[in-house]
Image: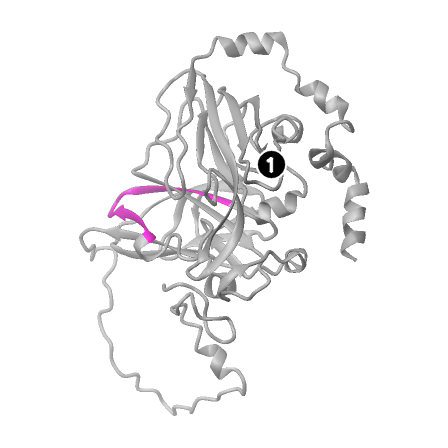
């Protein structure tokens, strides 16, 4: 059945276009012709000052761009296939860019010419490439950047439209390259820049499909069956259980403005992104120029991203999560923002009383058989090492 499914997609229009990434370029000569740079474009690029992009790993974000002119921005990425921790005691063979899941955050300015230099390590077993959702070119640049092991490919694209965009490996089979961890975010700042904030953070949601269940120890193989059925064992922020929890929590202070760049690499599920105890003052809808205000939960489709801004005026630990809540409780989709500062009783009192409830005609509990054990895991406060057979697999709230 799986072979029939694959054959169907290979014979579709999309399959005919994308299969060339893994099998050579001979089937798409028109795309090759379109990607040949013209003399005019080359001359224009040569006039631009050249700078190397500042690349940061999640949750860090490069500093805002201060220049008021376009530049040629060189982005250097290396494909590395390596075994890393999915959670403590659990390993997974990730396919990465620059050894990190998610891949580095890239920050450029509207009008910049972005030069991508993609190298593929000799230790890789697969060719790799990059599809930039910010690039208005055939296959997002994946054809031009198709790179076998031991090689480096270079291509350029003009960042024409501002916004926050996903980029990911575009080599065949694209679905598996995504499921193995090859994705990141690129911010194309508008020419006038973004409004200033006090803190910026990088968060990427994604799914992992392992043969073992959540928390099963050891090196876990990828499960194609679970991926096709869209049944991930892990739905995580920044590629690891607890990557943004406890000692890895994001930090801020009372009254600071916070901007979160949130991506959803999928490869299958949409994200219902929510910050418990806060309201998003501004949401850049699907990462574009439309701004919504006073939003409680924002939807991020698979293969998309958004920017959200908020201000927190009361100290404490704030939980961000996918409000498709069984994922958060059982599959790891939670993180912390720890806000420090003075208490603010004008906004929040804390608990004022704790006293007995004098109920008229109190009733006894009415337990339902087989449900009691599952109720024990409903407080969102269990260890990530516990399983979903009645106990929560989430990290502590």
Q: Nearer the viewer, residue 141 or 205?
A: 141
Q: Is residue 264 magenta?
A: no
Is the magenta region chiefly helix, strand or loop?
A: strand
- Residue segment shown in magenta: 248-263
Question: Going by the image, does 171 lie left or right of 183?
Answer: right
Q: Is residue 215 above or below residue 347?
A: below
Measuring from the top left, give residue 337's x and y in whole percent: 33, 52
- Which quadrant holds residue 303? top right
In this rendered view, identify the residue nearer to me: 228 or 217.
Answer: 217
Q: Position of residue 158 (x, y in %)?
A: 55, 21
Instruction: State whether residue 66 appears in this view.
Output: yes
Q: Quadrant of residue 193?
A: top left
The residue that mark 1 highlights is: 128
Please check the rendered image and state whether residue 250 is part of the magenta-colored stretch, yes or no: yes
What is the quadrant of the N terminus in the image?
bottom right
For image coordinates 49% across by 37% down, the residue present is: 185
Q: Is residue 227 above or below residue 120?
A: below
Relative horizontal placement of residue 389, taking residue 294 as reference (left or right): right
Quarter of the image with the C terminus in it: bottom left
Q: Residue at x 36, y 89 (%)?
A: 360
Q: Secondary structure at mark 1?
A: loop
């Amino acid at each position: 059945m799986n072979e029939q499914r694959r054959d169907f997609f290979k014979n579709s229009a999309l399959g005919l276009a994308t299969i060339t990434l893994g099998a050579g370029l001979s089937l798409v000569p028109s795309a090759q012709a379109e990607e040949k740079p013209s003399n005019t474009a080359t001359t224009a690029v040569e006039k631009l000052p050249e700078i190397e992009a500042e690349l940061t790993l999640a949750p860090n974000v490069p500093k805002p761009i201060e220049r008021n002119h376009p530049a040629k921005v060189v982005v250097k990425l290396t494909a590395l296939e390596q075994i890393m921790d999915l959670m403590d005691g659990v390993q997974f063979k990730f396919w990465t860019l620059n050894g990190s899941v998610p891949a580095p955050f890239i920050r450029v300015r509207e009008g910049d010419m972005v030069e991508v230099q993609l190298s593929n390590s000799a230790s890789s077993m697969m060719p790799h490439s990059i599809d930039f959702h910010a690039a208005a070119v055939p296959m997002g640049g994946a054809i031009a950047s198709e790179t076998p092991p031991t090689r480096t490919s270079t291509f350029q694209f003009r960042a024409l439209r501002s916004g926050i965009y996903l980029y990911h490996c575009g080599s065949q089979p694209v679905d598996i390259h995504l499921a193995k961890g090859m994705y990141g975010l690129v911010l194309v700042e508008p020419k006038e820049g973004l409004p200033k904030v006090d803190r910026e953070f990088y968060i990427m949601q994604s799914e992992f499909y392992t043969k073992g269940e959540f928390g099963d120890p050891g090196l876990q193989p990828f499960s194609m069956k679970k991926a096709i059925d869209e049944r991930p064992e892990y739905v995580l922020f920044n590629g690891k259980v607890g990557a943004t929890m406890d000692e890895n929590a994001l930090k801020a202070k009372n009254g600071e403005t916070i901007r979160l760049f949130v991506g959803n690499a999928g490869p299958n599920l949409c994200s219902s992104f929510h910050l418990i105890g806060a309201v998003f003052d501004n949401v850049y809808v699907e990462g574009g120029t439309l701004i919504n205000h006073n939003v409680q939960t924002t939807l991020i489709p698979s293969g998309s991203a958004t920017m959200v801004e908020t201000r927190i005026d009361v100290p404490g630990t704030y939980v961000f999560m996918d409000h498709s809540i069984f994922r958060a409780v059982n599959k790891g989709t939670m993180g912390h923002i720890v806000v420090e500062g003075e208490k603010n009783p004008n906004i929040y009192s804390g608990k004022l009383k704790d006293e007995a409830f004098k109920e008229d005609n109190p009733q006894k509990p009415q337990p339902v058989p087989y449900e009691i054990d599952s109720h024990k895991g409903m407080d969102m406060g269990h260890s990530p090492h516990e399983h979903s057979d009645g106990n929560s697999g989430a990290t502590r709230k």
